[in-house]
Amino acid sequence: MEPTTLDTSQEMNQPQGLRALSRGRLILVLAAAMLGMLLSALDQTVVGTAMPRIIAQLNGLQHYAWVFTAYMLTSTATVPLYGRLSDVFGRRPFFTLGLSLFVIGSLLSGQSHTMLQLIAFRGIQGLGAGAMIPIVQSIIGDVFPPAERGKWQGLMMAVFGLATIVGPTLGGWITDNWGWQWVFYVNLPVGIVAVIVGLIALPSQVQRRQHNIDYLGAALLLAAAVPMLLAFSWAGTEYAWKSAQIVGLFAFSLVMWLAFFIVETRVAEPMISPDLFKENIFTVSVIASFIISAGMFGAIMYLPLFVQGVIGTTATNSGAIMTPMMLGFMASSVIGGLLLSRTGRYKAISLAGFVIAIFGMYLNARMDVHVTNAIVIRNMVITGLGLGVQMSLFTIIVQNAFPFKRLGEVTASLQFFRSIGGTIGVAVLGTMMTNRFQSAVQANLPAALTRVASPESLAQSANPQALLAPEATAQLQKMFAQYGPQGMELFKQLMGAIRQSLATSITGLFAVSVAALIAGFVVTAFIREIPLRRSYDTGETTATAPAPEPSH
């Protein structure tokens, strides 16, 4: 449903103003966008490294997951709101608002004296982060026509990959030398500079008009998304999948989603218009992005566990382990963006990326306890090369298929479903790994162990932590020493069983990811390809929903 209170002249006036930006102003705009992307991506990896020290000082192991869950809930749920409102009122106020909330949340997080305070302040950080990535992508869409966006979106994804590599190392260094509080305080100077640059550089061409803000839709969206994300985050860890708490959250979320859909079909300016899904390009892009996130993020997070637990490679942090994949990711993002800008054809590039990613994930699924570091690095690079191009490609595809005035809405909506896919993937694959590990350990334990040790003792000892923490390993050795001369041999058998079981359970997740990526390939094969616009002439060259074939 097209908004009834927007004047189409806005759609033409805004691109004209953006095309008139001077080179210096354009550099400042890109600098603000890159600072926003860097800040959002860096924070997630830096904080992860500092968490053990935070837990030790604030004494809150039972609340560990909530430090990440609070951030994820607020950032994911607010993405569509920021996207829609930035279309109506302009990028600048919401980009600077998001950065400001992020900076305030960072300052308060560093001042936390309890875990509950930290969780609340991380939620404030998430409220700001929800604006940053989708609006950064929309800003790129504001200043460049679709045919030129590929190389710049690819650059933004390369910044994201760089933050993933540098973040954990930086977080460890800051924590060891300055204290964990500074992993939050370090955001302040970068964030303040980004706010200032954004206020100076970002254009403000949106004309003041009367708008119908969909407050009810926004409330229903939050009421639908938050319980669903909580259910997937808690299921299999805090509560059983069939527990009353999880079933109740899913049921409530479903009711809210139905109410949200009904409301969105009846308002003039919906938060996420159901009409978007009438466009083949948007629907396919959402499904493909959801599948990529669900199959990719849920499995990739277990690669460091495989490298450290199964292979036994020591690493100061997960960033060092993931560097090969992130390097492939960065290279693919940049090269794919350049190819897209040069050729203007996205379907073949996307399908080729899927093929490479499927092959890389297949190689990961074939790994076992005898795999070498060189083979793991090769597999990571191949997987990264396949996945990197996909992260920015679908954003450009959907931006190209809709009028300029809906750029923020479609960009944020795609990011919203991508984030939900990642959350669901992490939760479901995490439960699968835990169940597979427990059953594999029972099958791999040698009979000699079951004769000398009680089932309770074996259940407590057969834990992946024995492969990761030297203290746990030493404690196991001490326990098995009581069995006399055969004790060390039994200890080696137990460690071998744990290592084999861990390898089996993790590579099984990679196999699931292969299936998910194949499904993404099949879905993408049905996407309608239209030439990328080389101007902002939205009147003749942009599809609408439903979208006619554009003329050129």
Image (cartoon, grey):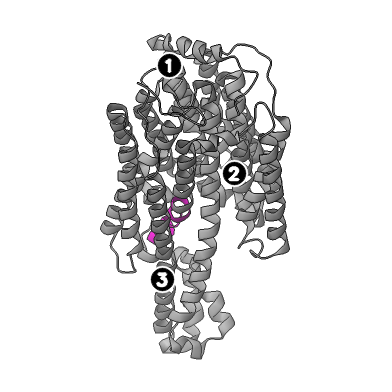
Of badges 1 and 3, nearer the viewer stands 1
On residue 72, the disc is 2
Q: Which mark sits nearer the N-terminus, 2 or 3? A: 2
What crowding class fits label 2: few (fewer than 14 Cα within 10 Å), some (14-19), or many (20 or more)?
Answer: many
Indicate the amino acid at tag 2.
Met
- Expressed as whole percent of the image width and height from the top left, the position of residue 15 reads 47, 14
Chain part drawn in magenta: 296-308
Left or right: 42 with respect to 382? right
- Assess whether residue 301 is covered by the magenta stretch: yes
Disc 3 element? helix
Q: Is residue 93 magenta?
A: no
Q: Is residue 162 visible?
A: yes
Q: Position of residue 197 (x, y in %)?
A: 50, 17
Instruction: Give the vertical position of 288 relative to 105 (above or below).
Output: below
Mark 3 highlights which residue?
A: 499
The residue nearer to you, when weighing 142 against 488, is 142
